[in-house]
Amino acid sequence: MIGVFDSGLGGLTVLRALVARFNTVDFVYLADHAHVPYGNKPSEDVIGYTRDCVEELFSRGSKLVLLGCNTATAVALRRLQQQWLPESKWAAGHNVLGIVAPTVEGATQTPWAVTSPQYPQKYNTDTIAVFGTTRTITSGVYPEEIRKRCPKVTVVQQICSELAGAIEDKRPEAELDRLVREGVEAMLASNGNMPPHRAILGCTHFPLVEHLFRKYLPPFTRILSQPEVVADSFEDYLARRTNYLNGDERGSVTLLTTGDPQDVSEKARVFWSDVPAFARA
Ligand code: DGL
């Protein structure tokens, strides 16, 4: 059983892509609605909440947890992988993965196994725009991971501090439209009004308003589908790590929230019409 975690509903965009890809794997998704949004919270809070949720998923039988959240990946993944997990009771046979590295691999077309810049990526001088929460952008993890693979790529980062919360709260389309327009305009202004070659929607909530990013980004800019590239990378990973699966998996999907299950189920249905009901974690 694979665990997928997000602060709220955004990680469902990743879960959906995984469920479509692995129809015999059991998934359990945990949304931390008690604390959403994470994007403007102090790092120590994000790390603590993420660790608690990963523990909850491990205790429910997941051996592998994917942080379907850019903010948690950017802020907490290294700490959890390098400090917490090796010293925890889950050290043996468990792992936590994030979604930033696979996204960067997709954006730079540099596969997972490549750790140093390869030809022709070494000479790639494209511009990649990254939109994310305050914590994701200020962590600098996207430019760091992109430059490891493509040192000549220009990365233009843009904080969209209110957008994930507004999507989570189901605010009116006009308000979401304004927040996306302002984010895109600020990104273009900081890049001398030059359109980027590619855009990473570096928050799992943002694919829910991809149509608005498409409306305001120049047609020249290709928007990367984070859920799809994460699913590609995860498929490759799982094929080599079947030990994280139990022999008797049947393709079940369990959705949990630390918030109000009825309210969360209703909100989720807006963008995933046949989503299973959430239960209280
Ligand atoms: N969906 C999450 C992300 O990918 C978090 C948004 C938030 O909680 O602020 O960053």
Image: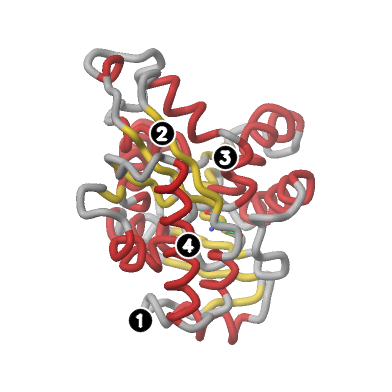
The answer to whether the beta carbon of the residue marked 4 is less than 8 Å from any atom of ligand 1 is no
**Residue at image mark 3:** 96
Relative to 86, 124 lies left or right: left
Q: Nearer the viewer, mark 1 or mark 3?
A: 1
Residue drawn at x 26%, y 48% is 221
Q: Nearer the viewer, residue 150 or 235?
A: 150
Query: Residue 239 location in percent, x, y?
Result: 32, 36
- Report which residue position mark 4 lands on: 182
Q: Amino acid at mark 2?
A: Arg
Label annotation for residue 241: 2
- Mark 1 and mark 2 lie on one chain; the one further toward the N terminus is 2
Secondary structure category for the residue under label 4: helix
Mark 3 or mark 1, which is nearer the start of the sequence?
3
- Mark 3 Cβ and ligand 1 under 8 Å apart: no
Q: Which sits earlier in the primary sequence, circle 4 or circle 1?
A: 4
Q: In terms of image quarters, where does ligand 1 lie?
A: bottom right
Residue picked out by circle 1 = 273
Residues at marks 4 and 2 touching, judged by CB atoms closer than 8 Å: no
Q: Distance from label 4 to label 2 (Cα)?
A: 43 Å
- Which mark, by number, is residue 26? none
Q: Nearer the viewer, mark 4 or mark 2?
A: 4
* Residue type of the residue flagged with mark 1: Ser
CA–CA distance in space, label 1 to label 3: 29 Å
Crowding at mark 1 (Cα within 10 Å: few <14, some 14-19, many 20+): few
